[in-house]
Amino acid sequence: MKTSFRVICLLLTSFLICHAAFVEAQSSDRQQNLFDCKNGWDSCNSALLTPADKYQVAAAKHEQNLADCKAGLSHCDRSALSGPELAEVVAAAHRNMVIDCWGGLTACDHGKLTTAEAAGVAVAEEQRNVSDCWNGWSTCKLAKLSPSELSEVAVAQHMRNVSQCWDGWSNCDRSKLSATELEAVRVADHHRDYLACVSSLTGCDRSRLTPEEAGTITSGSNKTAR
């Protein structure tokens, strides 16, 4: 009798464990399907949704559509929005347009800016133009710079040219260097040529080396050959 009771208890316990695992698996599958449907994925099986699930899916789709409309995406469905939501979308579109104006993007419509927004955008455009001129970019408009800004940009352009000459770049304009700067650049050229010859790199011109430097390189080559 005791043995039979134990067997029954074991069977009942196994059944309860299996049932719990089955219910948990079903719940997990339901939650995964609900997640897929909320995100509009192809793996969504709408037939498995409960009325409460369908309400959640519809709410999620509505929120996604509202976000798409605020972002100005082409698949936005404005007809599904309420009056207050449409107002939110209009406000978001204006904010995005102002941001485009601040960034100098073509989507900017200056005619839709308020007086305060236009003033802020004008300052941003001026600062961006100064930065472009400092960097020597083609978008720089020198005519829009003030006398002091022109002076600062001229200094920046000169220093950039000196740096390019020091580095041996082809766009270096040596005619714009002072006598002291030109001499320093020639020293840098010579040092760069000597290093190229020592390392057997392309660009080595032994004719520019002093007899002592050429001798050092030849001596080093002979020792390597031995």
Image (cartoon, grey):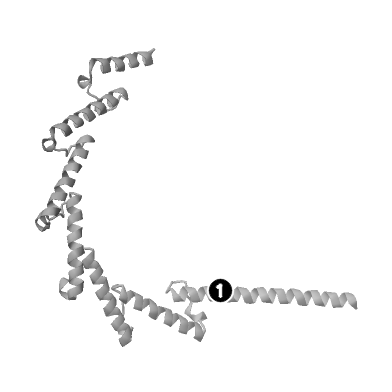
Outermost right residue: 1
Left/right of residue 8 with respect to residue 72 in the rendered view: right
Q: In the rendered image, which quarter is residue 192 located in?
A: top left
Left/right of residue 157 with respect to residue 91 in the rendered view: left
Q: Is residue 108 visible?
A: no
Q: In the rendered image, which quarter is residue 122 located in?
A: bottom left
User: Foreground residue, 92 or 28?
Assistant: 92
- Counting from the top left corner in percent of width and height, residue 32 is at 52, 73
Quadrant for the N terminus, please: bottom right
* Above or below, 38 relative to 209: below
Query: Which residue is denoted by mark 1 in the rendering?
Result: 29
Q: Residue at x 50, y 85 (%)?
A: 52
User: Foreground residue, 178 or 26?
Assistant: 178
Outermost left residue: 143
Q: Residue at x 56, y 74 (%)?
A: 29
Instruction: Identify the element where label 1 is drawn.
Output: helix
Q: Residue at x 82, y 77 (%)?
A: 8
User: Foreground residue, 209 or 10?
Assistant: 209
Question: Mark 1 packing: few (<14 Cα in 10 Å), some, or many (20+)?
Answer: few
User: Foreground residue, 192 or 151?
Assistant: 151
Q: Residue at x 21, y 67 (%)?
A: 101
Say which amino acid is labelled 1.
Asp
Quadrant for the C terminus, please: top left
Q: Is residue 92 visible?
A: yes
* Above or below, 92 relative to 184: below
- Counting from the top left corner in percent of width and height, residue 170 is at 18, 37
- Counting from the top left corner in percent of width and height, residue 110 is at 16, 71
